[in-house]
Amino acid sequence: MLHTASEEDPVVVRGLRKQYGDSHVVRGVDLTIHKGEVFALLGPNGAGKTTTVEILEGVRQRTGGDVRVLGCDPADDRRDWRARIGVVPQSTGAYTDLTVREVVEHFAALYPAPLPVGQVIDMVGLGKHGKKQTTALSGGQQRRLDVAVGVVGDPELIFLDEPTTGLDPVARREAWDLVQYFADRGRTTVLTTHYLDEAEALAQRAAVIVDGKVAEVSRVSELGGRADTSTTVSFRMPPELAGRTLPALPAGVTVERDGTNGDAPGIVSILTRTPTAVLLVLLAWADEARVRELPELRVHRPTLEEIYLDLISRNREAKAGTP
Ligand SMILES: Nc1ncnc2c1ncn2[C@@H]1O[C@H](COP(=O)(O)OP(=O)(O)OP(=O)(O)O)[C@@H](O)[C@H]1O
């Protein structure tokens, strides 16, 4: 049963299971991925992300559950269906003694309406290497070739499994531009990544998979209750204000002080949902005491990485507490 998903949704998964012998590696995954979105799959090593993605790509058989990808069951592996999806697998392909251009041309010929080969080679940053033997490419250049091969068919749905692993920072940004290019064309992308900045930059929604189950699926901006988390305003108490009480702060704040270290005044941290209001009060207070700079003043909102690590650790603790 594929309830609550629309006909339009390119990926609909319900109760997906995969077992290798006695080992249950995907244990009841539900996912609905909407048309035109970049959807990130996050989770620790061995969580079952690649297994799930490979089932969606039709390269791995499932043990149970319902799966619809572009309206078809991937297990049927229809040729016309396959031409509508693009796959950049986790491991780099081996293309023997062909040149970059020959490899991309070869794959382009498999699709009814491929993108121009030269454009794709340029887009992945291999413009200067079209005539190079693939065996002579660096690891990062080979990874770019994988991406070219995955997208040359101008697919409706693209699976990118850790596409930027091994790329230098400039090449990573180029790969991000490429994902954005397809998003702008209304294409759908399923992006598996360990880089949370990548998920944050590219994806609208994400699922966190832990131990073969979806621990959470939400908008990236709301992952792990992120939208509701407090901001920390902190500073080192200046000597001029040491020993004074803080001014009256807006309601709902929590104040923490680390111990003063000998004569050094300690750090004051204020957890708040209204950092601007807190800053206004603090700055007026400092100004009144003629303190022009609050030392080490910092306004810190938890990063996606901190939220993610917290989510994984809470998940592990909950599991450890389960009898
Ligand atoms: N062919 C196989 N036979 C037996 N076990 C397998 C096989 N393929 C994968 N596994 C196991 O299934 C589990 C999930 O692996 P999977 O590759 O899906 O994880 P992942 O979330 O993609 O991890 P990573 O982030 O490291 O890529 C792992 O414990 C892995 O060892």
Image (cartoon, helix red, strand yellow):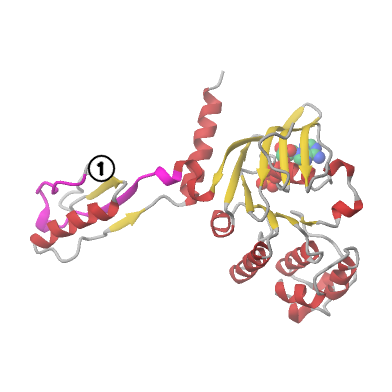
Q: Nearest the camera: 186 or 31? A: 186
Number of numbered discs visible in the structure rendering? 1
Q: Nearest the camera: 199 or 317? A: 199
Q: Residues within 10 Å of mark 1 (few under 14, many from 20)?
A: some
Q: Which quadrant, please, contains the C terminus?
A: top right
Q: Which quadrant, please, contains the N terminus?
A: top right
Q: Is residue 292 left or right of residue 170?
A: left
Q: Residue at x 52, y 23 (%)?
A: 321
Residue 150 sits in which quadrant?
Answer: bottom right
Q: Nearest the camera: 201 or 143? A: 201
- Mark 1: which amino acid? Val
Which residue is denoted by mark 1 in the rendering? 253
Query: Which portion, as a residue range, is magenta?
Result: 226-250
From the top left corner, tell me how far across and down residue 202 is, in percent.
59, 59
Residue 129, compared with residue 219, is above or below; it is below
Q: Is residue 227 on the magenta stretch? A: yes
From the top left corner, tell me how far across and down residue 13 is, in percent.
72, 38
* Quadrant of ligand 1 in image: top right
Residue 181, compared with residue 28, is above or below; it is below
Q: Residue at x 68, y 40 (%)?
A: 5
From the top left corner, tell me how far across and down residue 181 is, in percent.
66, 67
- As helix, strand or loop, the secondary structure at mark 1 comes to loop
Q: Residue at x 81, y 74 (%)?
A: 116
